[in-house]
Every structure is written in C-alpha cells, then in structure tokens.
Amino acid sequence: GGAGTDQGPMKNGRLFEILYLLVEKRAVTAGERAELLRAVQPDCDFLGSLVLNSTVGGLNPAAVELAARSGAKLIWMPTCDSAYEREHIFGDSRPEKLPFWANIILELKQNQIQNPTIRLLEEGALRQEVLEILAIARSHDMAVATGHISHQETFALARAAKEMGLRKLIITHVNFPSTFYTLEEQQELLACGAFLEHCYTPYATGKVDFAVMLEQIRR
C-alpha cells in the first residue's frame, strides 16, 4: 500500500493464503521490497511495482527500465502528482476530508520543497517519455496502470498502448470520483484491449452506489 510498513502484507499473505500480492509504494520502487518479502514469506508471491510520481522523476523511462530489471511487474502512471488529480483534490471539488497523501503535499509546499505536477499530454499528444515507457513495459511484459490521470490522457494512452502491442493496460479506479468512467467510456477502453479495475473502496466509503458498480461489472 501507499503507507505503513511491509509487515502488514506478510501477515495478510499468511492469513488469507494469498497467492499473489502486489506491493505498491507511491514514492519509491517496490521491486526490491517484493523480493525481500518473497524470501521471508515464500508461500506468497509478492509482485513489485513503480508509481511514476515526482519522487521518482515523474515520467522517467530510466526508472521504469531499472524497476523492470529489479523484478517490478507493474508501472502506474502518476497518481497523487497527476496534474488532473491535484486539481480535483485542491480545486473546486475539494473533498471535506483530504486523503493522507494530500496532507503530505501540503507539508512539502509549506516547507518549500518542490513536488511538481505531471501531465502526459503536450499540445494534445502523448509526450515522448510516455511512449518510451510503454515500449519498455512491452519489452519486459509489464503491466501499465493509468493511475489518476485525466480521461483525455487515459484514452490517448489506451490507443497508443493498443497500437504498440502492449498486452496489459489497466484502467485504474473506474468507479472512483476523479476517475469515474461511464459504461460507454468503459466499453471504448475495453475495445482498446484494456482491463478495467473496479474497486471495493469507493463503495465502502460511500463514493459510489453498489448498484452502479454492479451494473458496470455486469455490462
């Protein structure tokens, strides 16, 4: 997860007899952590990942390549440092209770520590770094998740992934407030060969009605 220690996943792996458990860290690569956890808990296969936030240089192809070599299996596009997500959290639609990472962003700003936002598009087209990242992911057979990028960025990414032959593109949080996709939009993304991630948390926290989530999955 994005916070806490790595002991929780080990306990969860033993308790629920999970065969695969993905280790995500929003600020650093988790490939090495996954390798360590596999050594400590061999009956659970931990998978490492990398989230392309500013703490790893944002859209950084070199970081993706080295993450792949360290065993990471999933690359997330920007989440908390996505320009779109920041605008959603700190703009007119600001929620009453900020997520934990938003408070860290505010602390960094208060301490005058630079933590820039990230956009995938430049003049309406995907930036060259994004195309390089997709190519690296394809060469290592990694999955790429959209993170908390905008709808415009997501559709551009999905089309490029399809054209490049990337086999594993995951549309993150399709039922989350900032990344909510209509049924028609989801079907268009499916046509690009993408997988849709329906999460329990938005329902559990009252952000989406269960009937809406169920209907999306059924369709």
Image (cartoon, grey):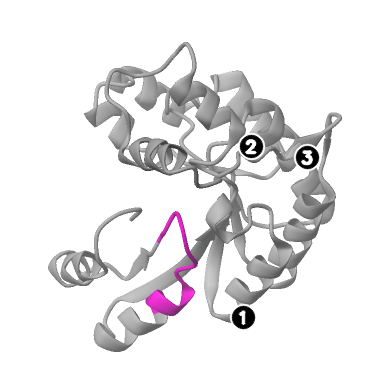
Residue that badge 2 annotates: 190
Residue 58 position within the rendered picture, expressed as x and y whole percent measured from the top left: 63, 52
Q: Give the Cα distance between marks 1 and 2.
A: 29 Å
What amino acid type should be assigned to the residue bearing mark 3? Arg
Figure disc tally: 3
The residue where tag 3 is placed is 159
Give the extent of the magenta segment.
24-34
Name which of mark 1 and mark 2 comes first in the sequence: 1
Q: Residues within 10 Å of mark 1 (few under 14, many from 20)?
A: few
Residue 33 on the magenta segment: yes
Residue 29 seen in the current view: yes
Q: Secondary structure at mark 2?
A: helix
Which of 37/14 is in front?
37
**Quarter of the rendering containing residue 181:** top right
C-alpha gap between disc 2 and disc 3 = 11 Å
Residue 61, percent across and down? 72, 63
Residue 132 horizontal/vertical position (percent):
80, 59
What's the amino acid at mark 1?
Arg
Residue 105, magenta (yes or no): no
Residue positioned 60% across, 38% down in the render: 117
Give me the disc on residue 69: 1
Q: Is residue 141 visible?
A: no
